[in-house]
Image (cartoon, grey):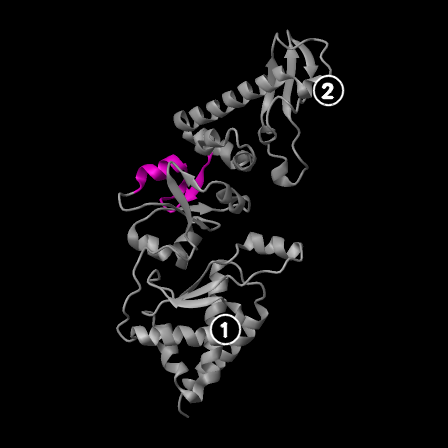
Amino acid sequence: MNREKFGMGRETPGVNVYCRKVLIESECAAIIPDWLRFVKGVVDSEDVPLNISRETMQDSALIRQLNKAVTSRVIRWLKDLGKTDPETYTKIFDEFGNYIKEGVCIDDRNKKDILPLLRFGSTHSADEMQSLEDYVGRMSNTQESIYYLSAPDYASALASPYYEVFKQKGYEVLLMREEIDDYLVAQVPEYEGKKLVNAEGANLNLMETPAADDMSKEDQDKLCEWLKEVLGDKVQAVRATGRLVDSPSILVNHESSVMRKLSKLQNMPMGTRQELEVNPSHTVISLLNDLRQDEAHQELAGQVADQLLDNSLLAAGVLDDSRSMVQRLNVLLESCLKAHKPAQ
């Protein structure tokens, strides 16, 4: 059982060191790296002196050698189990996967060997976990990068506006479900020569910005300028995009929800690197473009622009305070109902 998973305190090292069946040290922290503290067992070596002190155990070249050998053997065993009995390995990873992810982040010496042990959810399958090797093996010739998306589950990923372009292109996307995953991907810039790219990033360039039927390039530029003026410092930039299919807008270059929480806890100011991308082919965007040009409805147009941003923040999982959004929604609902009030 993973005690840390249930908040029951930090797991203690579980490997005991013996020499000729004589216990030298129980729960020896030096015999395996800290991230393998979930492993339980014994190491019996005839080379360990019976009278070795605890202090010497920590600094002994022999112990460092044993550490290297035991670590390599455990990694090799887990790797082989993942290939010969994927179902059993998936159960182990479900329980102790965060330890393995921790190993990738802190164990530079063994990082390359630990990477094949990672498993992720994926848009490829609702039920099965996927390795990076599985993902790369299924990549098409036109795909250059490994894409990932922060999503709690399969259904949420498929409903995400960030997934729309990948669905259209037929590209698989890995799902990052745990808070540690944000830090993990920062430590793994690439795998087998393929870069890991955030699906929520701004520079995907997977689709050209379409020429919307009812909005010229000039109108798109003017709309983006107007949106930036209305939204002010809430966004760094606004631009048209071709990556969206069913959604009117998305937020890119934003901090993850985990990093925002950390910034708040540490009273650190959050930057405004976030940018808004709008879909010029979407009905909401084309109607907003008409509305902003109507002098009689400037206030309503501004409210729609603010709501568009809040919708994008909500979809990205980084909406900090929904109270102002709810108030604005009520105003917009009232305007909508008044406009369609049946004749008496």
Residue shown at 67% from the left, 58% from the top: 267
Kindly identify the amino acid type of the residue bearing the numbered disc 2.
Glu
Q: Position of residue 107 (x, y in %)?
A: 55, 32
**Callout 1 secondary element:** helix
x, y percent for residue 183: 54, 45
Quadrant into which the N terminus falls: top right
Q: Which residue is mark 2?
A: 55
Left or right? Give the position of 305 relative to 211: right
What residue does disc 1 label? 231
In the displayed structure, 223 sits above or below 138; it is below
Amino acid type at circle 1 is Leu
Q: State which quarter of the image contains the C terminus.
A: bottom left
Q: Nearer the viewer, residue 109 or 340?
A: 109
Q: From which residue to which does the magenta span run?
A: 118-139
Q: Residue furthest bottom?
A: 344
- The secondary structure type at the circle numbered 2 is helix
